[in-house]
Amino acid sequence: MEKIIDESLQGSALALKKKNANGKKLYIESYGCQMNFSDSEIVASILANEGFDTTQNLNEADLVLVNTCSIREKAELTVRKRLEKFNAIKRDRPHMKVGVLGCMAERLKHQFLEEEKIVDMVVGPDAYKDLPNLIQEIDEGRNAVNVILSKDETYGDVSPVRLHSNGVTAFVSITRGCDNMCTFCVVPFTRGRERSRDPQSILDEVNDLSERGFKEITLLGQNVDSYLWYGGGLKKGFEKATEMQKATAVNFSQLLERTALAYPKMRIRFSTSNPQDMTLDVIHTMAKHKNICNAIHLPVQSGSNRILKEMNRLHTREEYFELIDNARRILPDCSISQDMIIGFPTETEQDHKDTMSLMEYVKYDFGYMFTYSERPGTMAERKMEDDVPEETKKRRLSEVIALQRQHCQERTQRHLGKVQEILIESTSKKSDEHFMGRNSQNTVAVFPRENYKVGDFVMVRMDECTSATLIGEAVGYSENN
């Protein structure tokens, strides 16, 4: 749940520039969070070296891959419908092969491959480098499967292509897997235990992006604050590391500082943070470097201590408040956003009121709110009954959304009258005569295009706003331009 899911990108097909030497066509769709879209870029990069160009035309594909998500039931239903569609096309293109990648792979491998026979290949999140061998297997008429989870695979040596890129912003994955066994979450079972990338490989990737003209990166991880590099291996193995390994280890705050110092013109964001792992040294590092954006995505999931305990969240509401207070003391201008699960098993009206009161205390800038949906394989699914009626979940969710909308309006209005740096990302969705970009706090701003261009850092005076969008006028270039 602790991952931002962009509904506008769900199921989108990816396309790259063609390589003259490549003769085969890859069609790849992605569902779920930013990590999945980042993984699709790794897959496309690996397969480009195997002679595959990407295509957005399903009817010309030789290989169709779906990068799946197990976070919400809706994604699984959508993927199943898409697989049925692919198989209908396959009847006219019998040489076309279909594969499932990612988070649904382990759980549904037997069902997809053997029972329903709707795919030729199933590949888990740590097995993408095995794709060339698996493709050879299916070319020779055998089903292919590799869902083995790795203790050390980080894809740090794969230079990902940028499939969804606007040429301005990019994601850089720094960790894989997760050690936090939240009872609602399937990630530790689908992506394995937590391990971190070599910091030098991260800096090399940022350098490559900088040289190609990118202006903003988001350091990405299931649980980004618990980044810890001590020479490789699982994070939980750190306690057995040598004294030298411990002395030279790099934590998230240090990685953030190294990146900020090495690329002072590059805007830096990160996601997602976990309250139990976020430390004050990270917030102090943010305050020290103006190229680190003043925005923290800090999922809380519930405002009730009882429900937090049921979720196996290793923080209390009081500890969360203390973290928020410290963040706002050190970074007064910081925006804070949330993830919230509504209707978790046994949630009462009092638990719901606790969530609402927590929201009133924090007043989040943005929020990602969902009703609880039972995910197969999780501790909650095995040990708890999904006992909150659907109509109750929906009513509570609508109350949470209404309150968040009110807070969005309040938090957006605080920018009015200010002149802020905006990185232009694209033209506005509503008007070709306007550009859109984001301020340091991640609030969207739109303003007349004039003579600026995508990728420029522009100072914009904020004149008016909707609940979540600033409307203003550019007053000149930023010194960062």
Image: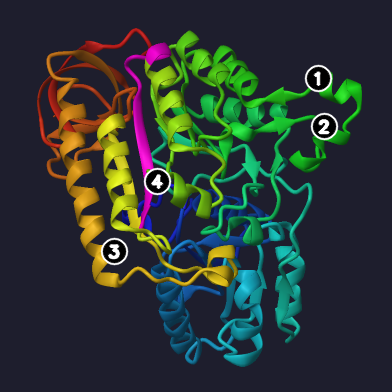
Question: Where does the image place residue 75, in percent across and percent down from the top left?
Answer: 42, 68
For label 4, the residue is 304
Q: Which numbered disc, 4 or 1, marks the residue that appears first in the sequence?
A: 1
Say which mark, if any, is on residue 231: 2
Q: Secondary structure at mark 3?
A: helix
Q: Is residue 349 left or right of residue 208?
A: left
Q: CA distance from mark 2 to mark 3?
A: 45 Å
**185 w.r.t. 297: above or below:** below
Q: Please give left or right for residue 350 compared with residue 410 in the image.
A: right
Tell me if mark 3 has few (under 14), some (14-19) or many (20+) residues whose alpha carbon lies within 10 angstroms of its own.
many
> Which amino acid is tagged 4?
Ser
Disc assigned to residue 464: none
Please provide the residue range marked out in magenta. Answer: 329-342
Q: Secondary structure at mark 4?
A: loop
Q: CA distance from mark 4 to mark 2?
A: 39 Å
**Residue tagged 3:** 393
Q: CA distance from mark 3 to mark 4?
A: 16 Å
Residue that appears at 20% across and 52% down = 399
Q: Is there a contact, CB below 8 Å, between mark 2 and mark 1?
A: yes
Of circles 4 and 2, which is in front?
Answer: 4
* Element assignment for label 2: loop
Q: Which residue is labeled 1 in the image?
A: 248
Query: Given the image, on which type of amino acid does mark 2 rest?
Result: Gly
Q: Nearer the viewer, mark 2 or mark 3?
A: 3
Give the residue type that dot 3 points to.
Lys
Q: What is the x, y in percent for residue 320?
A: 45, 32
Foreground mark, 4 or 1, reads 4
For this rendering, which residue is in front, 137 or 18?
137
- Examine the structure image and report whether residue 192 is included in the region drawn in magenta: no
Q: Secondary structure at mark 1?
A: loop
- The Cα–Cα distance between marks 4 and 1, rounded to whole angstroms, is 39 Å
- First of labels 2, 3 by sequence position: 2
